[in-house]
Image: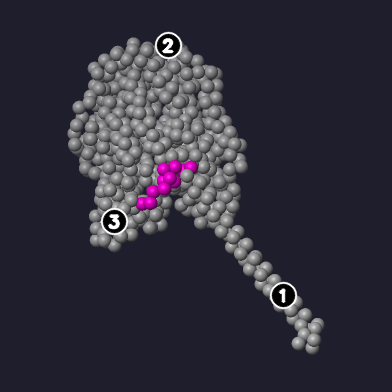
């Protein structure tokens, strides 16, 4: 089995075509909407986007290349339990259907952090939450952009800088020139590419092994199908509680972030927004099932080939397992390896474009709104496009810096979402669910939550115990699988796993799984898999839960002393509909604009017409008054002149 596969001309042609489509969509909307130079049109599609493309965009925005690579790799190394986070994701959509969608749509916001200022009457809380959210987006975008670049460098020999540059430049260009419409329609296209790409490697791999029944038998025999992890210990990874509860809170944090709220606000009606959540439940369940099967197929494939690529020294990181498998398994089908490359690029582009568009929306709405109000709408929109471009350049730089981050990409990505998103989610949920919370309590609780989650996540990265992987496939056939001189030349001679090739025994393949201690001094033994300080060993799957709980209950409890004075000032329109009934709050005045952006826009136009009409009326009255005064003056002057001319006869 060779370390790298030389891609064919057909592979590169397919990849280039798949990358040119997003650019074409961006150019199309740049020309189509050239005369609609408004920030509302650029950032929200004029709030008139159709449900289907927005639904697909909402789905694929968070299902990046990290999921394509990370989830199957996690199943390969640790078993099937991780997949139940997708059950938590589905639960979060159900919660969002009854809470965030009806609340946020009726407010017609551009930035999600506007809500925090409206609800808590605190610009400080709004800006602090925005800072946390933007940091989360920047860091997550860097990991998303780096992930396929590292994988393709190892599996296909594509230089790291080239992959990062391709993703960064293409994503930045079509987002800059086309705005949210190009992002959403490109996401819809990339969603199809990702699903077809995952299906292609699933079918090819299972066929090689002898069908899905053989895949299941191999995985069952090697312990990959263990569904019995029920420990309540927060330090245990991939238990039923950790995956379902942790997955629910992690995805709720995503459903309350800027990218999601922009898509909710971009749809025509609240019914469309709700339906998009229902469809996403189905898409998430299907996608999670496909990734589960891919992970099992990848393991069965390498078990069948009797060559683990990591222990065999062909890859240097377990995150590279899926791309390495896909490019090797698809190498005999012209263009299919290139299609899988396009799948990874599509996953990164969809998340990258959504992220930089969201960052630009936060910048112009939360930071520069007062400054831009002095400019015309056309100029303000051009400034917004420049901001999008700048963020794209920043993320490219951060992607290179993120090359030093180690660990499973699925864990890193979800750790960022949980550690940063949880504290924001807690304050948001407290404000929308409890009518008497106040801004001081919210700020203190959020500071405490973010400090705690960042502390334990960093401590986990540095001092936390290592998670023991399941026994990998053997390596005794790695040498035999290299069937040509060119393949032999690509076999590793140094670095990670190189020693396994000289030994050529299956026992060496268990090095990673069984090496459980290192000697420190003469008599001290340190076990990297042993539990140490409790907080540093808490599973990353609980970070979002911990951040949300501290933030939510801290806000509620610290608000109790001022409960009476705060309750009388609350605007019930800023409270979840279900919470209004629980607290017996009066229902806000309901208008058609609460259900439809079409009515909201018509009302805005009507309001503007009335204002302009009123101004015209005022101007007309003022002109008439001036004319009457001038006419009176002329009449008096004429009378005076007439009296003077008549002289004594006038008597």
Q: Viewer-proximal residue, 539 or 630?
A: 630
Q: Earlier in the sequence, mark 1 or mark 3?
A: 3
Q: Residue at x 80, y 83 (%)?
A: 646
Any part of residue 440 in sight: no
Q: Nearer the viewer, residue 284 or 571?
A: 571
What residue is drawn where x is 48% and y is 26%?
A: 342
Q: Going 61% across and 62% down the picture, which residue do you hit?
A: 619
Picture coordinates of residue 120, whole percent (x, y): 35, 56
Query: CA separation, marks 1 and 3?
Result: 67 Å
Instruction: Decide if residue 227 is on the left or right side of residue 586.
Output: left
Q: Which mark is residue 635?
A: 1
- In the rendered image, residue 105, in percent from the top left (x then y), is placed at 41, 44
Counting the numbered discs, the total is 3
Quick one: label 1, few (<14), some, or many (20+) residues within 10 Å? few
Mark number displayed over residue 483: 2
| Range covered by the magenta-colored residues | 588-598
Task: Name the front one of labels 1 and 3.
Answer: 1
Q: CA distance from mark 2 to mark 1?
A: 112 Å
Q: Earlier in the sequence, mark 2 or mark 1?
A: 2
Image quadrant in which the C terminus is located: bottom right
Front residue (pair 97, 224): 97
Residue matched to label 3: 436
Q: The N terminus lies in which quarter of the figure?
A: top left
Q: Can you tell which of label 3 and label 2 is closer to the viewer?
A: 3
Mark number for residue 540?
Answer: none
Answer above or below: position of 322 versus 231. Answer: above
Q: Secondary structure at mark 2?
A: loop
Query: Quadrant of residue 302 in the image?
Result: top left
Choose the circle earlier in sequence order: 3 or 2.
Answer: 3
Instruction: Label 1, secondary structure: give it.
Output: helix
Helix, strand or loop at label 3? It is loop
Q: Position of residue 554 (x, y in %)?
A: 26, 53
């Amino acid at each position: 089995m060779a370390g790298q596969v030389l891609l064919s001309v057909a592979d590169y042609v397919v990849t280039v075509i798949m990358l040119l489509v997003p650019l074409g969509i961006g150019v199309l909307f740049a020309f189509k909407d050239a005369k609609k130079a408004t920030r509302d049109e650029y950032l929200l599609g004029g709030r008139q986007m159709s449900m289907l493309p927005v639904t697909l965009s909402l789905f694929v925005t968070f299902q990046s290349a990290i999921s394509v690579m990370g989830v199957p790799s996690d199943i390969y190394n640790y078993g099937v339990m991780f997949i139940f986070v997708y059950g938590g994701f589905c639960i979060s959509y159900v919660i969002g259907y009854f809470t965030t969608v009806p609340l946020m749509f009726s407010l017609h916001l551009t930035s999600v952090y506007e809500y925090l200022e409206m609800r808590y009457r605190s610009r400080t809380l709004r800006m602090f939450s925005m800072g946390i959210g933007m940091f989360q987006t920047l860091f997550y975008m860097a990991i998303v952009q780096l992930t396929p670049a590292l994988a393709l460098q190892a599996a296909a020999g594509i230089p790291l800088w080239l992959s990062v540059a391709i993703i960064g430049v293409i994503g930045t260009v079509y987002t800059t020139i086309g705005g949210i419409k190009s992002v959403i329609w490109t996401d819809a296209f990339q969603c199809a590419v990702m699903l077809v790409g995952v299906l292609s490697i699933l079918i090819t791999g299972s066929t090689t092994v002898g069908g899905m029944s053989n895949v299941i038998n191999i995985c069952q025999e090697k312990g990959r199908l263990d569904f019995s992890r029920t420990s309540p210990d927060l330090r245990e990874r991939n238990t039923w509680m950790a995956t379902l509860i942790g997955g629910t809170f992690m995805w709720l944090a995503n459903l309350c972030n800027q990218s999601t709220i922009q898509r909710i606000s971009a749809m025509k009606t609240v019914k469309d927004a709700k339906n998009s959540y229902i469809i996403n439940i189905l898409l998430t369940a299907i996608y999670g099932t496909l990734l589960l099967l891919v992970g099992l197929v990848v393991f069965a494939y390498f078990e069948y080939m009797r060559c683990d690529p990591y222990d065999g020294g062909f890859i240097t990181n377990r995150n590279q397992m899926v791309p390495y498998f896909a490019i090797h398994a698809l190498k005999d089908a012209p263009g299919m390896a290139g299609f899988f490359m396009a799948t990874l690029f599509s996953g990164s582009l969809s998340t990258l474009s959504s992220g930089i568009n969201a960052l630009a929306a936060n910048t112009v709405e939360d930071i520069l709104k007062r400054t831009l109000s002095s400019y015309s709408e056309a100029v303000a929109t051009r400034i917004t496009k420049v901001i999008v471009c700048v963020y794209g350049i920043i993320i490219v730089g951060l992607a290179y810096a993120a090359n030093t981050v180690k660990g499973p990409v699925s864990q890193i990505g979800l750790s960022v979402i949980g550690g940063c998103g949880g504290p924001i989610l807690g304050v948001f949920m407290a404000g929308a669910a409890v009518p008497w919370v106040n801004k001081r309590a919210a700020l203190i609780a959020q500071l405490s939550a973010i400090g705690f989650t960042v502390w334990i996540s960093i401590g986990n990265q540095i001092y936390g115990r290592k998670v023991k992987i399941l026994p990998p496939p053997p390596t005794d056939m790695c040498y035999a699988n290299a069937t040509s001189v060119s393949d032999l030349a690509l076999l590793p001679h140094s670095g990670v796993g190189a020693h396994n090739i000289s030994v050529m025994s299956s026992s060496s393949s268990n090095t990673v799984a069984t090496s459980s201690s290192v000697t420190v001094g003469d008599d001290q033994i340190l076990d990297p898999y042993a539990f140490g300080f409790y907080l540093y060993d808490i599973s990353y799957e609980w970070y979002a839960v911990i951040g949300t709980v501290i933030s939510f209950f801290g806000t509620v409890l610290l608000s109790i002393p001022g409960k009476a004075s705060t309750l009388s000032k609350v605007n019930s329109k800023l409270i979840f509909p279900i919470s209004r009934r629980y607290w017996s709050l009066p229902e806000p005045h309901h208008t058609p604009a609460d259900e439809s952006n079409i009515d909201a826009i018509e009302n805005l136009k009507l309001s503007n017409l009335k204002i302009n009409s009123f101004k015209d009326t005022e101007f007309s009255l003022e002109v008439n008054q001036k004319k009457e005064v001038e006419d009176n003056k002329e009449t008096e002057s004429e009378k005076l002149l007439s009296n003077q001319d008549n002289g004594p006869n006038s008597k």
